[in-house]
Amino acid sequence: MKLNVSMTLGLVVLGISAVPAALGQCGMPAKAAKPTAWHPQYGVARLVRAADDDEFRREDGKSMVGMWHVIFTANTSSGASIPPTVIDNALVVDHSDRTEIMNSVRPPQDGNFCMGVWEQLDRSHYFVNHFAWYANEFPNANPSGIGNAQGPTQIQEWIKLSSDGDHFTGTFQLDAYDLSNNILASFTGTLAGTRITTSTKEKDLVGN
């Protein structure tokens, strides 16, 4: 996913048209069991769980791991305040190895996939460091339908998981670069996610 100054209007129009009626959510299964050790007591061997090295483990087992529908809404552009503007409507998968992949609403020929890593800060808060890698500008006037090459984009996200483990909200910082590593566009704003489950319908993602 690459953003630059020329693509902002196109993304706004495309993003707003794809915003669902409800915002996103997320969640995760229980942590894997930790190694066990034998502890004899009264002559009878029994299995017990070793010390738990996950200080943030939730009793309900929910975390960022899973598939999400995420809406990014910008409130500033290059440091200046703007009306709340949807700049991305994406499907995101957060893996248990703390990597993630995002499929954005934009033409595949101009780059609609990007990847990142995440970490858990405390029981409910997470940080994501995310990169879109050398795609092409969008929108574009190129007759071939493929925009000019652009540099990478970095998105940093600060997320709070809801008490039910199936929703999150947070803030983001997005910086898009040209091929000489100069910032072309910068946005800050809010994001919201909804967990996708086996019961999720297409209409739940795009609205009625």
Image (tube, grey):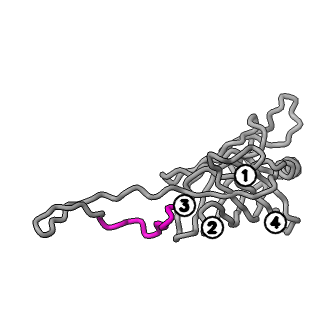
Q: At 50% from the left edge and 55% from the top edge, which residue is drawn? A: 29
**Disc 2: which residue:** 162
Which mark is nearer the camera, 2 or 1?
Answer: 2
Q: What element carries label 3?
A: loop
- Of callouts 4 and 2, which one flags the residue occurring earlier in the amino acid sequence? 4
Q: What's the magenta region?
A: 50-61
Number of on-image labels: 4
- Number of other residues with Cα within 10 Å of mark 2, as a class: few under 14, some 14 to 19, many 20 or more: some
Is disc 3 in contact with disc 1, using a CB cutoff of under 8 Å?
no
Q: Residue 6 carries which label?
A: none
Q: In this view, does 12 lie to the left or right of 3?
A: right
Of the residues tagged 3 and 1, which is closer to the observer?
3
Amino acid carrying mark 1 in the image: Tyr
Determine which of the numbered discs, if any, sits on residue 177 in the image: 1
Point out which mark residue 76 bears: 4
What crowding class fits label 4: few (fewer than 14 Cα within 10 Å), some (14-19), or many (20 or more)? some
Residue at mark 4 to residue at mark 3: CA–CA distance: 29 Å
Please give the residue where the numbered disc 3 appears in the rendered image. 63
Instruction: State the CA–CA distance, disc 3 to disc 1.
Output: 32 Å
